[in-house]
Image (spheres, grey):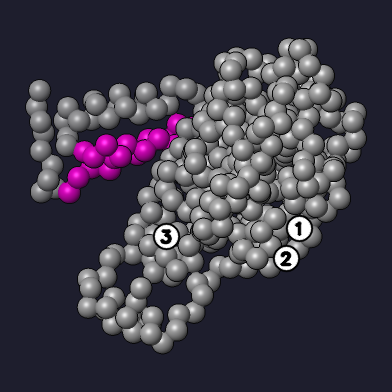
Amino acid sequence: MSLLDFLRQRPKNTANIARERLRIIVAQERVTRGGPDYLPLLRNELLEVIRKYVHVDTDAVQINLERSSEGEVLELSVALPEAGNAAATGG
Amino acid sequence: MTETIVITSGKGGVGKTTTSASLATGLAQRGHKTAVIDFDVGLRNLDLIMGCERRVVYDFVNVIQNEATLKQALIRDKRHDNLYVLAASQTRDKDALTEDGVGRVLDELKQEGFDYVVCDSPAGIEKGAHLAMYFSDRAVVVVNPEVSSVRDSDRILGLLSSKTRRAEKGEGPGKQHLLLTRYNPARVEAGEMMSVKDVEEILGIPVLGVIPESENVLAASNSGVPVIHDAESIAGQAYTDAVTRLVGEELPMRFLEAPKKGFFKRMFGT
């Protein structure tokens, strides 16, 4: 590291941020790929319903389609906010 | 036996045409009879990168629509007798490419005894890109170590495993390779750019080559001479290495580390 670099504020390691963001989005997109076309729409509608009751992030709903010999399992997981941030919007 | 290789990426501007030109040239340099086809109808550019733009008389669409023979449309490279360019049409619209037509041209190239047919895909996932990959035996996915390019590459990998003739026939996807371009080792070391390993892990397919960012790439396209001809440049050498791996030889990756800085630069930076 050069003297000038040291005196300057070092930027954050953005390569790591890029890698982590890509891991998540690529995994998410691979799940819906090849699955029925309605999956992303289903996810969005579920998100809207949940948001009537709880404030959640747009990525709070994860959908997973597992295929096995016995059939397909649609797995839903919803990450709820921490207790302090949770508030019903009513509506 | 003819092998059809698609050069694709999803995202535009990552170096598909530069890569098509250099890989095709490299294969010809190794003695293989090679054709390189521009699938970007309406936005023809491979002819410029190959330096044959003033010799285009007939194009890919003319052949498909029986307005010219394949022999008339193939442009022989100035430097290599065994390398031919098939230009895209600049005036027609994208629908001029048909599955039947493309299949027929590729079959004819097989009968003509070509060893390799390199298909330079347009950006996107529309018809031209679909047809460029549809008949391929192998795919080279060109990717920049940058978020949008990596994500688009994953999308393309999904299409390669489902929307090709091989996949439809149940033969499984062909071989897939990643080719990283615009790689800047100094920025990787500074934590500003994802590394080869990062990209390889996210996309999960092996790396064929890493082309370092180099001013010689622009110089090569300025002059219409594929950068692989520039044996002095690290980009040219990296493409030569990639071709060697493409034909099945093993070779360690080069140019993954930043050149060491001298004392002055270490003290005062750039």
Residue nearest the viewer, comparing A11 with B36: B36
* One can see residue B212 in this view: yes
Taking the image as shown, residue B230 lies to the left or right of residue B2, namely left
x, y percentage for residue B150?
48, 46
* One can see residue B107 in this view: no
Extreme residue in the bottom direction? B263
CB under 8 Å between discs 1 and 2: yes
On residue B244, the disc is: 1
Q: Which residue is mark 3?
A: B193
Residue stretch rendered in magenta on the structure: A56-82
Q: Chain of mark 3?
A: B
Residue nearest the viewer, comparing B175 with B50: B50
- Badge 3 crowding class, 10 Å Cα cut-off, few under 14, some 14 to 19, many 20 or more, is many
Q: Which residue is mark 2?
A: B251
Among the two numbered marks 1 and 2 on one chain, the one whose residue lies closer to the N terminus: 1
- Badge 2 crowding class, 10 Å Cα cut-off, few under 14, some 14 to 19, many 20 or more, is few
Q: How far separated are the C-alphas under marks 2 and 3?
A: 24 Å
- Which residue is located at x 59 percent, y 29 percent? B44
Quadrant of residue A68 within the rendered picture: top right
Residue nearest the viewer, comparing A1 with B154: A1
Q: Amino acid at mark 2?
A: Leu
Q: Amino acid at mark 3?
A: Met
x, y percentage for residue A63?
40, 35
Q: Chain of mark 2?
A: B
Q: Chain of mark 1?
A: B
- Which residue is located at x 29 percent, y 75 percent? A5
Quadrant of the snapshot with the N terminus of chain A:
bottom left
Q: Decide: is B78 above or below A37.
A: below
Check residue A75 for magenta coloring. Answer: yes
Q: Amino acid at mark 1?
A: Thr
Element assignment for label 3: loop
Check residue B25 for magenta coloring. Answer: no
